[in-house]
Image (cartoon, rainbow, N blue to C red):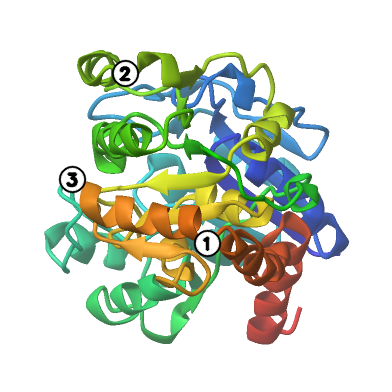
Amino acid sequence: MRKLLFLSSIAVPHQVKFCYALQDYFEAEFWFYETPDRTRGKWWRVDLGDRCKLLQDVLFHKSGPLAQRYLALGLSKQLNAFNPDIVMLGGFSIPSNILAYRWAKRNGKKTIVFTERSRNQNGVLRQRGLAWCLLHWLYRDVDMIMTSADDAVEQFRDEFGFGEKVVAGRYAADIDGYLDHPLREAKPAYTYLFANRMTEIYNPLGAIEIFAEVLAKYPGSRLLMNAAGELGEQCRAKIADLGVREAVEFLTGIQSWDELHAVYARSDILILPANFSNGNFTILEAMASGMGVVVSDRVLGIGKMIEDGVNGFNCEPTTIAFLNRIERYVNDPQLFKRHANLNRPTVEPLSAEGTAKFFAGIVQDRWNI
């Protein structure tokens, strides 16, 4: 088998499981710059096994301006020891990724950069300015650019000038266990899930306002909220101001990644009124679980899998728009079953195993290896 190395920022469970699914097609190893502790919490940690590892002596693996600007000392020596045939890099601008790319080109290896769409801090698509001219020059001999979603291809192919080297890829989803959840049925009141971090782009304050309106109309409703994020204090203040404290539960008791799917199993409707997002696994997880799904039309990538009124609801991130869609589930509980029957077959191939087969097919088609 060909040797594949993927340099990835954070050892999240999705990536670890993807590595082991790839073993059917490659002798694959994933090397990570840091654990999930800093950004997601210790309960995101999973056993890395013998094919994944954390790089040691990594500089600049902290928050602030140097976030995700990792420099792993001694990387070249480790690359020489493993000697991969294919080097896959999670992102362009990480210093160690650039060094690994240069090592690969010196040694005649195939190179892939896996990337999300490039946006500024305001969520606006970047154009080909000075920074991207420099990155294009640095990666001028790259063999493949693989984007995380179909709608990111155009930016890298045309705006950044990588042309036909660009292909559409995807992240692997960890949906083990979700597909076995029971279908939701009619209830006097439902449980709502805000599964994303309490950070500005995901609009947790808006989610609380939406839930307050739901609770006023349907007593007994519950809201489960991700407990992480810098807006936590503001969210707790909003909950107190709106008088919904007794109906909101922060998810502080999760001890391990394998417990996460149980949160979805006891939830009925996912709400994500994001101001912006490149796409979220929370949507795939809710789809696999058979939940009702109401997401903002500003969620790209995975968010576009939800068609308004077809397999869930996709609308403006306003209280009135979200309340309107939520009440469609309330008034017609058969929608849960209809949407689940559409969503589950859609997301099942996006598992680690399905994505590994998909990825291997792209490599085979391009390079016949």
Residue 116 point in image, percent of width and height:
40, 58
Quadrant in which the N terminus appears: bottom right
Classify residue 30 by image quadrant.
Answer: top right
What amino acid is found at the position of numbered circle 3 in the picture? Answer: Gln
Q: Count residues near mark 3 (Cα–Cα under 10 Å), then give few for <14, some for 14-19, many for 20+.
A: few
The answer to whether one can see residue 318 in this image is no
**Mark 1 against mark 2, which lies toward the viewer?**
1
Secondary element type, mark 3: loop
Indicate the position of residue 221 as horizontal and vertical percent values: 47, 32
Q: Is residue 208 above or below residue 63?
A: below
Q: Quadrant of the C terminus?
A: bottom right
User: Do the residues under discs 2 and 3 have CB atoms within 8 angstroms?
Assistant: no
The residue carrying pointer 2 sits among few (fewer than 14), some (14 to 19) or many (20 or more) residues within 10 Å by Cα, namely: some
At x 17% / y 59%, what residue is drawn? Answer: 124
Instruction: Residue 280: give x, y in percent of width and height.
Output: 46, 50
In-image side of 120 versus 84 (left or right) = left
What distance separates the C-alpha of mark 2 from that of mark 3? 21 Å
Q: Which residue is mark 3?
A: 121
Q: Residue at x 49, y 37 (%)?
A: 193
Is 111 situated left or right of 349 in this image? left
Task: Of the two numbered discs 1 and 2 on the same chain, state the one appearing first in sequence.
Answer: 2
**Which marked residue is nearer to the observer: mark 2 or mark 3?**
2
Classed neighbour count for the residue bearing mark 1: other residues with Cα under 10 Å, few (<14), some (14–19), many (≥20): few
Q: Quadrant of residue 339?
A: bottom right
Task: Check disc 2 and report its element: helix, strand or loop.
Answer: helix
For residue 232, which numbered disc appears in the image? 2
**Residue type, mark 1 in image:** Asp
Q: Earlier in the sequence, mark 1 or mark 3?
A: 3
The residue singled out by tag 1 in the image is: 332
